[in-house]
Image (cartoon, rainbow, N blue to C red):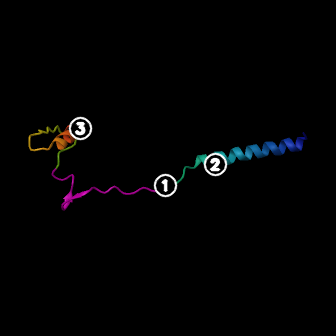
Amino acid sequence: MSSNRKNRIAQFVLFNVWVIIIVLWYPPFVSSQECVHPKYAHQPIHVNSWMPGTQVSVQIDQFFDDDQKAGLEAGN
């Protein structure tokens, strides 16, 4: 194999490595959406609610159906 051919192969490999590095260096640009607090009636849901980290006890009484009781117990 001639020296000129080896030089061309080395240039081709180095060029491909360079292109791969450039492509991986710049991440793809993405867009994000704004997070809006959900509304409950006419005020945001976080108004008149418990503060984060507040201990809340739920008492399940006989007025709940069996599937509702199971759902509440699974949620806790």
**Which of pointers 3 and 1 lies earlier in the amino acid sequence?**
1
**Which of pointers 1 and 2 lies earlier in the amino acid sequence?**
2
Picture mark count: 3
Q: Amino acid at mark 3?
A: Ala
Q: Residue at x 68, y 48 (%)?
A: 19
Name the residue tied to disc 1: 30
Q: Residue at x 15, y 39 (%)?
A: 56
Name the residue tied to disc 2: 22
Label 2–label 3 contact, CB within 8 A: no
Q: Which residue, as the protein is rendered here, is positioned at the far left?
A: 62
Label 1–label 2 contact, CB within 8 A: no
Give the structural element (helix, strand or loop) at label 1.
Answer: loop
Q: Nearer the viewer, residue 58 or 2?
A: 58
Q: Residue at x 39, y 57 (%)?
A: 33
Q: Nearer the viewer, residue 30 or 25?
A: 30
- Whether residue 43 appears in magenta in the rendering, the answer is yes
Q: Measured from the top left, where is residue 43 in percent x and y?
A: 19, 59
- Whether residue 8 appears in magenta in the rendering, the answer is no
Q: Amino acid at mark 2?
A: Ile
Task: Judge the density around disc 2: few (<14), some (14-19), many (≥20) Cα neighbours within 10 Å.
Answer: few
Q: Which residue, as the protein is rendered here, is positioned at the far front?
A: 66
Quadrant location of the N terminus? top right
**Is label 1 or label 2 in front?**
1
Q: Measured from the top left, where is residue 11 in percent x and y?
A: 78, 45
Q: Is residue 76 left or right of residue 30?
A: left
Quarter where residue 6 is shown: top right
Name the residue tied to disc 3: 74
Give the structural element (helix, strand or loop) at label 3.
Answer: helix
Q: Amino acid at mark 1?
A: Val
**Is label 3 or label 1 in front?**
3
**Is label 2 or label 3 in front?**
3
Q: Magenta region: which residues? A: 31-48
